[in-house]
Image (cartoon, helix red, strand yellow):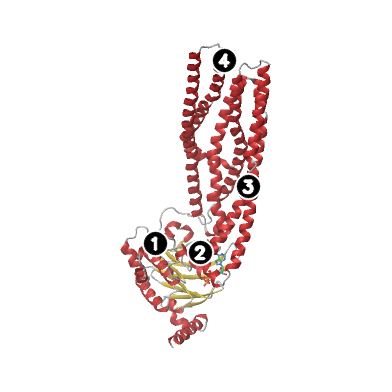
Amino acid sequence: MKELQHLNKYFLKYKTHLFIGMVITVAARIFLLFTPRYVKQIFVIVEKALKGDIAQEVFKAELLVAILYIIGAAIVGSILTFFMRQTIINVSRYIEFDLKNEIYNQYQKLSLNFYKKNRTGDLMNRITEDVSSVRMYAGPAIMYSINTFTLFVIVIIYMINASPKLTLYTILPLPILSVIIYKLSKEIHKRSTIVQEYLSKLSTFTQESFSGISVIKAYGIEPQTSTNFNALASESKEKQIRLARVQAWFFPMMILLIGTSNLLVIYIGGMQYIDGEIESLGTIAEFIIYVNMLTWPVATVGWVTSIVQQAEASQKRINEFLKIEPEIKNTKNINTEITGDIIFKNVSFTYDDTNIQALKDISFNVKVGETLAIIGKTGSGKSTILDLIGRLYDIDKGAISINKTNIEKLNLINLRDHIGYVPQDAFLFSDSIKNNIKFGKEDATDDDVISAAKHAQVHKNIMKFNDGYNTVLGERGITLSGGQKQRVSIARAIIKSPKILLFDDCLSAVDTETEEKILKNLNKISKGKTTIIVSHRVSSAKNADKIIVLDNGEIVQEGTHETLINTDGYYKHLYLKQLSETTSNKF
Ligand SMILES: Nc1ncnc2c1ncn2[C@@H]1O[C@H](COP(=O)(O)OP(=O)(O)OP(=O)(O)O)[C@@H](O)[C@H]1O
């Protein structure tokens, strides 16, 4: 129960609801317990009438009163049961909502490294499956526990009052029932966890197949994919059948044990009646109802125990994530002015998970209003530099400063707010084009959106769609071409009008003519801003104020386009190669 203490703050938050729920639960049980007592009463009245102890009119009147009591108590009890669920189960839904938000907010705070170390499925499971099983504890488990406790205490008092001996025999099989249900619930949970695992394997498999359907079709591997799917589905079916087998025992076991208790009541009660130990057959009827009333609550003791164990395990997994301190911490809460003067001083950086040293002793600076281009072979560390400016990772050695302040001392939110970043792999959300662009600036007007799209040279393409800017993009923006996606992503960065613009090879999918136009526009809008362009193309770099060439995490060349094309090295080689490609493309 240690892990579940995390929920105490929520129980405290909803204490009024919970208290009302508890009072209603107790009241509902009290009313429902009227039935057996009045059933007995009816037996007594009938017995008296049969013996001729009461007149016909009195008999009818007393019978009517008893029946009305039973009906009235059942109605009130049912209404209270409705409100019992409405209060306690609702509280569990509120707690579920709060907990999901708490986990989601924590996820948002955690750094990229966390996402690399944990699989998406696991992250999803904690916010869905684990929260669901915790909710079962916060709602049904608590409700059934109060229910069982109240019912048990009242019923046992009533039963002992009526016949202590009969009480003993009646409740004897109940603990056995509880233990059996506990064992069954545990087994059901074990098997249903396996079933869940298979269901998520199946959905991951199908999701991947649908996302990669073009590759599957292009390679003609549909039959192989179907065979793999069938194999997985058939394993999943086996697990489902194993689960159904153990679930099938649940009700037969309950019926068997209720039957045994009923038989004991009738047999022992009958013997006691013959021996004159109990006065009326009504007591036997009353006890039969008690036994049936007790069976489900007693069974729930086993069930609730298993729910609490599952919830404890789930909350433990949730707590593990909630306790993680974000690696990248915001050390300053007040905003610091950011103008975009960037200095890298002897920066080295190694990725934790791969142990790859991506940057080795890098030093450079970009002044406000300047454009820096970074050129280099694939894997040379270009994207890493951009990630470090946005403090997606903290560095091992050296210092990165903006406005002469170490970025670790800047307000993180403010820093990222001043950066317009266009990643290599443009990610668009399943939303309208307009909202995808506005993502960078929530309060942007339609005119701002259009202007950003024009600067990114994508306005004309957007206007060709029937719904224009309201065109909804499918999963990962499948209705757009690679180049269009890149340009929407550029518009998203431009609209923010940030102090620092970071472009990570984001013109790779557009033709050189469009690239030229975009670069010209960028030149206009980046006045007074710092721009860093990562590229494999000399055409993207040539107009930059400064160019650095990276190789294997080190700066191997540095200068302007003019100086670099006149110096032997990677840049000149690349320039000549791309120049000859352009020339040959013209013919
Ligand atoms: N998230 C990461 N985790 C671990 N290693 C990484 C990660 N990102 C990059 N690396 C490694 O760091 C090195 C530099 O990668 P980086 O992405 O910075 O290169 P790049 O020059 O941008 O390459 P490209 O031109 O192909 O985009 C590579 O060896 C890469 O494998």
| Residue type at numbered disc 1 | Ser
Mark 2 or mark 4, which has the lower sequence index? 4
Q: CA distance from mark 2 to mark 4?
A: 101 Å
Q: CA distance from mark 3 to mark 1?
A: 44 Å
Among numbered discs 2 and 1, the one appearing first in the sequence:
2
Q: Residues within 10 Å of mark 3 (few under 14, many from 20)?
A: some
Residue farthest to the bottom?
A: 587
Q: Amino acid at mark 4?
A: Leu
Given this view, does label 3 or label 4 mark the residue nearer the observer?
4
- Quadrant housing residue 279: top right
The residue pinned by badge 3 equals 244
> Which residue in the protein does label 2 denote?
399
| Distance from Cα at disc 3 to Cα at disc 4 | 51 Å
Report if residue 354 is visible in the image. no
Mark in front: 2 vs 3: 3
How packed mark 4 is, by other alpha carbons closer than 10 Å (few <14, some 14-19, many 20 or more), is few
Which label was assigned to residue 50? 4
Q: Is mark 3 within 8 Å of ligand 1?
A: no
Report whether 146 appears left or right of 492: right
Q: Is residue 486 visible?
A: yes
Residue 479 occupies quadrant: bottom left
- Between residue 490 and residue 323, name the one nearer to us: 490
> Three-letter amino acid code at disc 3?
Ala
Label 4 vs 1, first from the N-terminus: 4
Is label 3 in contact with label 4 (beta carbons under 8 Å)? no
Tell me, for residue 432, which label it has, or none: 1
Residue 210 position (above or below residue 96) = below
Tell whether label 1 touches label 4 (CB within 8 Å).
no
Report helix, strand or loop for mark 3: helix
